Image (cartoon, rainbow, N blue to C red):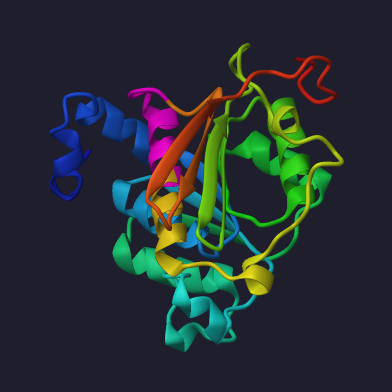
Amino acid sequence: MNDDQLLRYSRQIMLPDMDVEGQEKLLAGHVAIIGLGGLGSPAALYLAGAGIGQLTLVDFDDVDVSNLQRQIVHRQASIGQAKVDSAKETLLALNPELHVNTVRKVLDEAGLLQLARSVDVILDATDNFLVRQMLNDACIAARTPWVSAAAIRFEAQITTFDPRRADSPCYRCLYSDTDGTDQTCSENGVISPLVGVLGAFEALEVIKLMTGVGETLVGRIQYFDAKYSEWREFKLRRAANCPACGG
């Protein structure tokens, strides 16, 4: 690292668990963020600030005025602009050393598999059950860890899947093909700081996956009730005869 990087990331480097070695892992890392909405916005900002070397941003949508209540990577001037382009501008303004790739489309199974094979970690910030199922299968095939969160109204959940680990359950262990129903913020609403809490939590999980610091949420799922500030945690085990991971 050069002197500018040592200064920029000094508050992380001084952490004994991180040190220079951990920061260098982040600088060499490549993370994909699928969805630049309420969850993806704070996650992208924190990963850019923390020094992830390369981010690939995936989103098909444009910025709308109704997004600005919670999607903090976008600005008033971004209305009508592609979310990936708006986010890229904001992230580079925060950290000019960051390398940003943009994908402005919905990825199919082949596209998700190609993405999973090209990155170190994927951060799921979508609100689409089918996309998560396809992403799960792609990450299992590519042996790529991924972090998934969802938030609606005053409620949220988060977990991490790591196909590199024999004990890691997968998304289909949690939800079968018939369990999923897409509940979107546009239909049900969401309180804005909630997605900030969960998006930041996703970024933290990504950093732990990349550096090996601490323990991730693999095998655990946490639920947050923002109305009453209550966290609950449940064990998540591999499902018997899971069609995806063969639990």
**Taking 129 as reference, is 196 left or right?**
left
**Taking 180 as reference, is 7 left or right?**
left
Position of 102 relative to 118 (above/below):
below
Instruction: Look at the image and say whether residue 206 sits in the magenta stretch.
Output: yes
Relative image position of residue 162 (x, y in whole percent): 58, 25
Relative image position of residue 215 (x, y in whole percent): 39, 23
Position of 100 relative to 207 (above/below):
below
Relative image position of residue 239 (x, y in whole percent): 74, 19
| Residue at image location 37% in from the left, 65% down from the top | 92
Q: Residue furthest top?
A: 166
* Numbered label tally: 0
| Residue at image location 35% in from the left, 53% down from the top | 46
Relative image position of residue 163 (x, y in whole percent): 64, 22
Position of 228 relative to 29 (above/below):
below
Judge whether residue 24 can be spotted in this image. yes
Place residue 115 in its image quadrant: top right
Instruction: Look at the image and say whether residue 172 sits in the magenta stretch.
Output: no
Looking at the rendered image, the quarter that the N terminus falls into is top left
**Taking 43 as reference, is 234 left or right?**
right
Q: Residue furthest front?
A: 228
Tell me the chief SS of the magenta region: helix
| Residue at image location 44% in from the left, 59% down from the top | 194
Which residue occupies the foreground of this view, 127 or 141?
A: 127
Q: Which residues are magenta?
A: 202-215
